[in-house]
Image (cartoon, grey):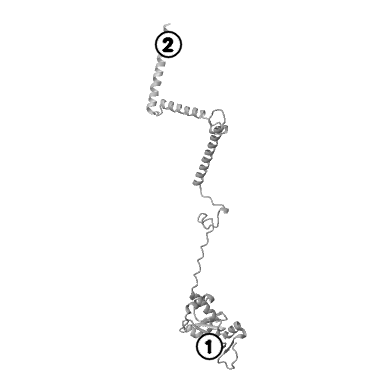
Amino acid sequence: MPPQRRFRALTYLVLAAVVTLLFFTSQARHARTPDTRSLHDFYSRTVTAMDKDHAAAAKPPAQKIIADHDVDADGDIDEDDNIMAELMAARLRQAEQKAKDNAKAKGPNKPELPAEVVGVGSSASGQSRTAPKAKDAEPAPAETEEDHAAEEALNTILKTAPIIIFSKSYCPYSKRAKGILLDKYVIEPPPFVVELDQHPLGPKIQEKLGDMTGRKTVPNVMVYGKSIGGGDDIAALDNERALADKITSLTGARVEVSLRFSQSAQKAG
């Protein structure tokens, strides 16, 4: 059987040549494109992943423990299990609320509800929700003896005559008003003149007169306690031939007013 042995030997040689060729071809391929992943690294990563899967599968879910209330896993649900379950539920609620707060803080600002905004202007957070307290009113200054005396003097003066001319002796506007009322007209009873610069309580009387009438300057012509104006006002009424009518309307028949130099000596009006 020499031919069969030679055939087998030739076959072995061919197989050896093919294996050798494949070996060298593989080495040349690895030399051109080297693989950075080694067999040892692949094995290590595979084992690590399998260990994590086994650990996750072996760990019981937290929700199941809470649902079963057997927290200490002793096969019996007792008071300790209930307390631990409540604590774990509270921690879960706190974690959920914290997550919501963080999300709200990172999210865009939302406008406040109309019911939560109380009288705000351009910004909902620029004002307080409570109405500001009114400042305490400052107490009125105590009345002095001079104030009291000036008030009594003013009341006495106003009762002296129906028409009072509050004046100052050096004031040109006062002189003009007095010239019209005392020289151009005949008034019965005659007006009473008070020179405030010569009266001992003149400044205080003028101050109270200003509070009463709103006119703080002189002259100030009063008819039965009502001011009809100063020097310009009296001159305007005279120019319009309305001064006598103005006085008569406030005094009625108790005061007579006529022009001093009228041709017929009749009453003005």
Which amino acid type is marked by label 1? Leu
Query: In x, y percent, where is residue 116?
Result: 56, 53
Identity of the residue drawn at 51% across and 75% down: 148
Q: Quadrant of the C terminus?
A: bottom right
Q: Which numbered marker is on residue 8?
A: 2
Q: Is residue 215 visible?
A: no
Which amino acid type is marked by label 2? Arg
Q: Nearer the viewer, residue 120 or 87?
A: 87
Q: Quadrant of residue 24?
A: top left
- Badge 1 marks a residue whose secondary structure is helix
Q: Nearer the viewer, residue 140 or 237?
A: 140
Q: Do the residues bearing badges 1 and 2 touch, measured as CB atoms within 8 Å?
A: no
> CA gap, disc 1 to disc 2?
166 Å
Q: Which residue is mark 1?
A: 182
Position of 34 compared to 150: left or right? left
Query: In x, y percent, where is residue 130?
Result: 54, 56
Position of 145 compared to 33: left or right? right
Query: In x, y percent, where is residue 207?
Result: 49, 76
- Badge 2 marks a residue whose secondary structure is helix
First reached walking from the N terminus: tag 1 or tag 2 = 2
Q: Quadrant of the N terminus?
A: top left
Find the residue positioned furthest to the front. Answer: 145
Find the residue positioned furthest to the right. Answer: 253
